Image (cartoon, helix red, strand yellow):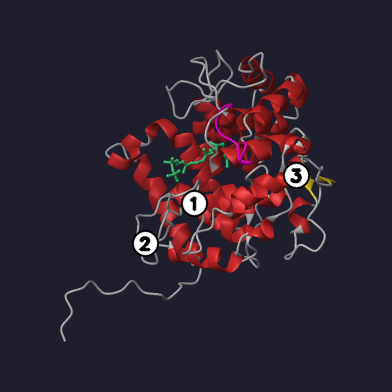
Amino acid sequence: MASFLAPAPTSIVPPFSPSIHKSYILMLSQKLSSPTSYEGAVTSHLRMSGVYWSLASMHLMCEEEEANVLMNSGEITEWVLQCFDEETGGFAGNVNHDPHILYTLSALQILAMFDSLSLVNTEKVVAYITSLQNLDGSFSGDSYGEIDTRFSYCALSSLSILNSLSSIDLNAAANFISTCQNFDGGFGCNSGAESHAGQIFTCVAALSIAKRLDLIDVDLLSWWLAERQTGGGGLNGRPEKQSDVCYSWWILSSLEIIGRRSWVNGESLATFILKCQDTEKGGIADRPDNVADVFHTFFGISGLLLLGQLKEGYRQVDSVYALPVDVVERLGLNAQVIEMDEGATGKQEDKRLAGYERVKKTKR
Ligand code: GRG
């Protein structure tokens, strides 16, 4: 009998295809730089983060030198420096835009990958970030004053990269983050705000940098995070929402920092991520059959790395700093992780977090 239904989506799981993803990133970089590009125009305000996601994806799939040549390190470095605002000490998302702490972190991450942090006016950048801390320990994103736990992470990660954590009130910063932990174990963007997996990463990673993981109710948080896995294997960012590839990163990295990466089913999550690849044009989308973008490409690759799916020929990703592990080691960055529970299944990737202080879970 003839069927008028659309063919069932294929259940074949495509293998990870690095070469097509590299071509996608290079094609996209060219396209966005074109003055007549629609996509370039609508994303111009956040170009700094776009460059970070592209460069970090390329770095994770290549040798350092190869990635820098492919991505034109000289040209990007020059552009990043043009986005520096001498007056405030912050970096903007693009030339002639306003500085913001989000783009300041992205700029530092890019320069860290190029091993070019010596080009940064550290004193000014540190003064900029320090000026954004509020009396309650929170951070504003810029001079307009919006407060969000994302900005706490940006501040702590940036200052750690610049070896200047002592320039802020670290205790107050950690205490503010702990006020954003909810009754369900998750964290939101502010005190009393709904738990969201993206915000949870920013809070957990910031507390890891501050070495205050003792402030977290680890068991409650682990359950909330583990419950984000849906029937299709992917992870959602909060209850009753759809799966999205980016939560593979926000959730796996948080779970890894608190020693519970094995609390999600890695095999079905990897299958979900692999199905989100565009096998013709390259790149990874938020969900199968959607249009790929560089944000989900970076978090999809990082998710597969954290799951131990990509080994030979890849660089590992650091769960706290979202940079290649060798870059974090070169900078001598520090943080804290919680030891895995005795009897937990799966293996914590010791190599990835080898240099960090390991603490036992506090009883709460
Ligand atoms: C260097 C990795 C790194 C991060 C820098 C910007 C930042 C610090 C962290 C962002 C954390 C965050 C809030 C991520 C979530 C992003 C996202 C997909 C938001 C979508 O929210 P909704 O409400 O989506 O549209 P849901 O999935 O809840 O429907």
Q: Quadrant of residue 285?
A: bottom left
* Residue 244 magenta: no
Marks 1/3: CA distance?
34 Å
**Residue 105 drawn at (x, y percent):** 59, 32
**Residue 55 drawn at (x, y percent):** 53, 47
Q: Which residue is mark 3?
A: 330
Mark 3 is on which residue type?
A: Arg
For disc 2, the neighbor class at 10 Å (few under 14, some 14 to 19, many from 20) is few
Q: In this orientation, which residue lies closer to the viewer: 48 or 114?
A: 48
Query: Which numbered disc covers residue 281?
Result: 2
Mark 2 / mark 1, whichever is N-terminal: 1
The kind of secondary structure element at disc 3 is helix
Marks 2/3: CA distance?
34 Å
Q: Which residue is mark 1?
A: 236
The kind of secondary structure element at disc 2 is loop
Mark 1 is on which residue type?
A: Asn
Q: Is residue 189 left or right of residue 32?
A: right
Q: For the residue with label 1, is its CB less than 8 Å from the closest atom of ligand 1?
A: yes
The kind of secondary structure element at disc 1 is loop
Q: For the residue with label 3, is its CB less than 8 Å from the closest atom of ligand 1?
A: no
Mark 2 is on which residue type?
A: Lys
Magenta residues, as a range? 183-191
Please, which residue is most extreme toward the bottom here?
1
**Residue 215 drawn at (x, y percent):** 75, 35
Q: Nearer the viewer, mark 2 or mark 1?
A: 1
Residue at 75% of width from left, 30% of height from top? Answer: 163
Mark 2 / mark 3, whichever is N-terminal: 2
Q: Is residue 87 above or below residue 50?
A: above
> Given contact means CB atoms under 8 Å apart, are the residues at marks 2 and 3 in contact?
no
**Residue 12 drawn at (x, y percent):** 42, 76
Mark 1 / mark 3, whichever is N-terminal: 1
- Residue 293 showing in the rendered view: yes
